[in-house]
Structure formats: C-alpha cells, structure tokens
Amino acid sequence: MNTLILFRDNPGIKVDRSPYTISTIYKKDLGNIDEWKRGLHQRGSHLTWLLHYNVDAIRKFFINSNQIKTIPNENEKYITFFGITQGSLKSELDYFTENKKQPLVKKIFDDLRKNKTHIFILFPDQMDLLHECSIVLDDVEKFVETHSLPLSSFTFVSSNYNLSGVQQKDLNTISFSRYAFTANIEKLRIGGSFNKIVESTSGYVRQHKFLGLVNNCFKPHRLKLLFFFLENDFFNDGIFTIYPFLHDVYKNKDDFYRELEGTYDLLMGYYEFNRKPLFKQEEHSECTQMKKRKQLLKTIYDLSPLRIDTKLPDHYGDDDITQRQFLNFSFALSSYWNLTTETDWDFHGPPNEYQPVYVFLSEKTWKPILGLQPFIMCAAHGYLNVLHELGFKTFDKWIDESYDKEVDFPTRMTMIEKEMLKLKSLNIHEIDKMYWDMYDDVLLYNYNQLDNHIDEEWKKLKNNIEKIWEGLG
C-alpha cells in the first residue's frame, strides 16, 4: 500500500511553495512513549499527530507501507492522510482552495477525480458533519462541488459516535477514539502500573469526595452545573477548577464576563423556550429559578480563574500553557468521584428520526478511566450506552444512571444533580467503602479495557483503509 501523510504548516518534507508538508514515520519512532516531554509536543509539529495515535501497531502500518515522500507519480494509487493540527475544517478547505494550483494539491485533486487516491481527514476535535443543517457539512458540499471532487473520495475521522444509525447520504465517517490513544500514552509512560499505586493506598482515606474540573470553554451545561455546585456547597467537598485558562483566551476579565453573560443568556433562552407555562400570565418555576441564578455570575467572575495545578509561563498565551500533561495523577489519588462535564451536550432539544444523533468522546471521558475513578457524566444522552458498547462498565450498581436515557436537557441535569447530592450526603468513609467495592469489577476492569479498546479502534480504521485501497483504480 502507498501512503501519503499530509500536514499544513508543519515540519516535514516540502515539495512546492504551498504550506503543505509530507511527514514520514521511521522505525526509530517505534516504542517512543515520551512525546509529552518538553520541547517535543509543540503545537503544529508532525509529532502532534503521532502523539494522538501513539501505538506501535499504527506506526508499523505506515512503516510497512510505501510512504510517499514527494509528489505522487503518474498513475500511482495511494491513500492520503490529512491531519488537522490547527484551525477548523472550513479554514483547511479554504487553504486547499488557495493552493489548488500548487503541484502537490493539484496532483491530489486530479487523483481524487481519477479514483487514484482517497483522503482520510483526521479531526482533532468534535465534528459537526453529522447534522443535516451543519454549516460544516454545507462547507464540504460547496468545496467538492466547486472543485468537481467526488464526496465519496473523502472519509472524515473523529471521536463522534453515531447513536441513531442515521447517516448522511454519500458521507463517509468513521468513529475513532483519538483521545483514548492519548490516554494510553500516559498509561505507557508510567509503565502501565498506576493501578499498583492506587492499590497501595487502600489503607488510607482520601482527602476529597469529588474532582470537578470545569473546562475553560463556555458551555451552557457547564454553567448550569457551576450554579448547582455553588448553591449546594460542593467546593468544600472536592477539588474544583473554574475556567482555569481564561487569560489564554481573553485580553481582560471584562471580556470574560461578557461571554459568561452570553452563555447565561443561551441557558436562560433554552428554559424560556422549552418550559412554557400553561397560562401566559404565569412563569414556569424553573425559569424563575434560572433568572435568580444570574446573580451568581458575579461569584463565578470573582472566583475565576480557579486553577489548582498548572505552572504558568511568564506570559499568558505561551504554547506551554495549553500543552499540558494529559492527567495530573495526584488528583486521582486525592479524590473519589469524578464529576465530568463533557464537551458536548445535546442542548438544542430532543432528536428526531431523520437526524443523526451522536456523542463526542473527548479526553474528559478517558481521564477518570485512566485515573481509576468512578464518574458521573454530564454529556449528551446515550453517552454511557456508547461506553457500554465499547466494552466499558459504569456505575449503575451504586447510582441511578437512568439519566443517560433522558433526552430533555433540564430533566437530565436534574437527575444528574440528584445523584451528586446523594453522594455528597455520604461521609468520606462511606464513599471510601463504595470506591473499593467497585474497584476490581469496574475501575480496574476499565483501566485494562483501555488497551483492548484502542486495539479494536485501530483494527476498525485499518480495515476501512484496506477496503478503500482495494477499490482505488
């Protein structure tokens, strides 16, 4: 098989004046599990791509292939892999358009039309292509139409998992747990033996019931959960962060507050639209409560950024501030339950039978699994079911996980909060006993299942690549 690994604005082999480079994987890369080392994991390097798929099985696949290192020969068929390490899909499509006359891009475009190549686009984050009304999908359709490219010659690879079985016509998508591979790197770096360290602490009680790392990105479901934490005094029972890297994003804190208000308006707007009273002169009680919570924005503003572990560079915005080690293992040893706020929450209403329904598995899912922690997942409905299908276990023996089936946003959040309050009502010794009761059957099982999972994910993608290869002319 002939393979071509393509990046934009990355170290690699330059073959023309375009911003694109060709990357190569060598035998010396086998066994490298230290790409988080300072100076190696830099944003925009080809090593970034290796980092996310850092298992020798994947490396060997490319090493054993004929890795193309120049503009492909005439009538040569090959599989193209384009890794997005910066920017959005739209911006990448725009760059392709700007460079369409450059020899490398021109050859790839010509070969796509001739069925001499197929391009796998590897997404670094969630992919909105699954929605019929997706702006991203519209951009893709315009791009292939403008350049007379067959949409069937593209495969989009991301960590989105389709729950509904509804698939967009002629759109090739593959679900692939990129972040599970990143978690596996960390597991390998410590010799795969973090479980031994955890087990050595069985004679001790941990300091905190909860670990709640509220991400730096504004999302309505995270704001709703922050309100809940503040109203119920969760901060005294756990380790929490609040928008810890806001200075990465905002020039000043007033800009931060304006976006905080905007997120609140989205949340309030959802309640006002979906919680309509029986009589116009009335206001739904949940809307009334949400209006009162606006006063908590000032509290969140004053607390932010609440950071607990990151070493800051001299200047906010330096690359090192965002290129952090995957998991701070000390947190996992200091707390029990992980209160996880995932990237996506199906916030805009229940699905219908014509729309694909998906969940996105980010690093936030794999951190508690790697850290041998139980978790309550604030994510899209059906999220736990996806984990079950991937061979992982969850915690319905100890908490009510029926929230995972609830499609209504406020109802699901209320069900989640109810379970969190139950755990909060337990004393630390009861939480400790619960933890060790589930350790072998669930936590350690999931820790070991991570290895099996990435093997299965790679086999799935590899089989698809080989099938596409056989179909090229």
Image (cartoon, rainbow, N blue to C red):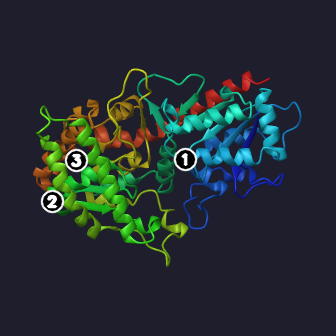
Look at 78% across and 38% down and name the residue there. Answer: 108
Image position of 367 with respect to 455: above or below: below
Q: Residues within 10 Å of mark 3 (few under 14, many from 20)?
A: many
- Toward the viewer: 343 or 38? 343
Look at 41% across and 27% down and name the residue there. Answer: 163
In this figure, which residue is indicated by the disc labeled 1?
A: 124
Tell me the element at label 1: loop
Image quarter of residue 279: top left
- 249 vs 204, left or right, is right
Q: Quadrant of the N terminus?
A: top right
In this figure, which residue is indicated by the disc labeled 2?
A: 233
In this figure, which residue is indicated by the disc labeled 3?
A: 435
Where residue 429 appears, x then y in whole percent?
13, 54
Q: Which comes before the other along the chain, label 1 or label 2? A: 1
Image position of 461 with respect to 253: above or below: above
Give me the C-alpha separation between circle 1 and circle 3. 33 Å
